[in-house]
Image (cartoon, rainbow, N blue to C red):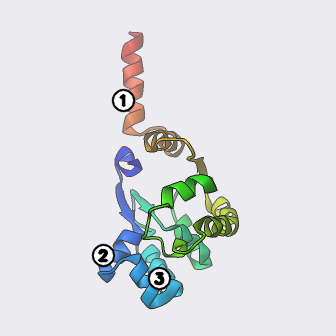
Amino acid sequence: MLARELGYRFLDTDRIIEERCGANIPWIFDVEGEDGFRQRETAMLTELASEPKTVLATGGGAVMRSENHPLLKQDSVVVYLKTSIEQQVERTRKDRNRPLLQNDDPEAILRNLFAIRDPIYRELADIVMHTDRKSPRLVVRQLVNRINPRTPRHRRQVRKEGRHHV
């Protein structure tokens, strides 16, 4: 949604890795382990980080390798979509495509991951967007206004307001 609003293209590193491997992420984790997947992720970031006018979605663990940090920051606006543990539990409850959460206590895993990753996310982020109890449309609208207030949507709004005052 954000890419569409900005007039950019959208790329998802996890989806591209799956397409190129011909296997889903849980299978990659099973066969290559987390380190093997993270190596693929770094290679993908190396390839895609400098793509212009692109919204690049990464998996949550991409920040765990320090060599990814300059790739993520390279000519980019880094957005941290911050969500409470409760929301994360709710959103991932039925998701079987998250290997790190496939155990008896996914909430404990999420709490641990948050404790480790949150400081890194905050350090890398240009924008921290709290997403609890917000619709995707509202999050996108707020992000667009912070990233680029001169988007087509902004110009339409200005024109609309201009006609309204005439």
Residue 24 screen position, x and y as percent: 36, 77
Give SS at disc 2: helix
Residue 48 screen position, x and y as percent: 41, 70
The earlier-in-sequence mark between 2 and 3 is: 2
Residue occupying the far front of the picture: 104
Contact (Cβ within 8 Å) of mark 3 with mark 1: no
**Above or below for 22 versus 12:** below
Q: CA distance from mark 3 to mark 1?
A: 43 Å
Residue 149 screen position, x and y as percent: 49, 38
Residue with the mark numbered 2: 19
Local crowd size for mark 3, using a 10 Å CA cut-off: few (<14), some (14–19), many (≥20): many
Q: Quadrant of residue 152?
A: top left
Q: Nearer the viewer, mark 3 or mark 1?
A: 3
> In this rendering, does residue 83 appear at all?
no
- Disc number placed over residue 156 in the picture, else none: 1
Say left or right for 155 vs 126. Answer: left
Say left or right for 159 vs 70. Answer: left
Residue 164 screen position, x and y as percent: 39, 13
Q: Which residue shows up at 42% across the image and 33% down it?
A: 154
Local crowd size for mark 1, using a 10 Å CA cut-off: few (<14), some (14–19), many (≥20): few
Residue with the mark numbered 3: 37
- Disc number placed over residue 1 in the picture, else none: none
Q: Amino acid at mark 1?
A: Arg
The earlier-in-sequence mark between 3 and 1 is: 3
Q: Which residue shows up at 58% across the image and 79% down it?
A: 67
Q: Which residue shows up at 33% across the image and 82% down it?
A: 21
> In this rendering, does residue 46 appear at all?
yes
Please state, as top left, top right, bottom left or bottom right, where the C terminus lies in the image.
top left
**Above or below for 113 versus 91:** below
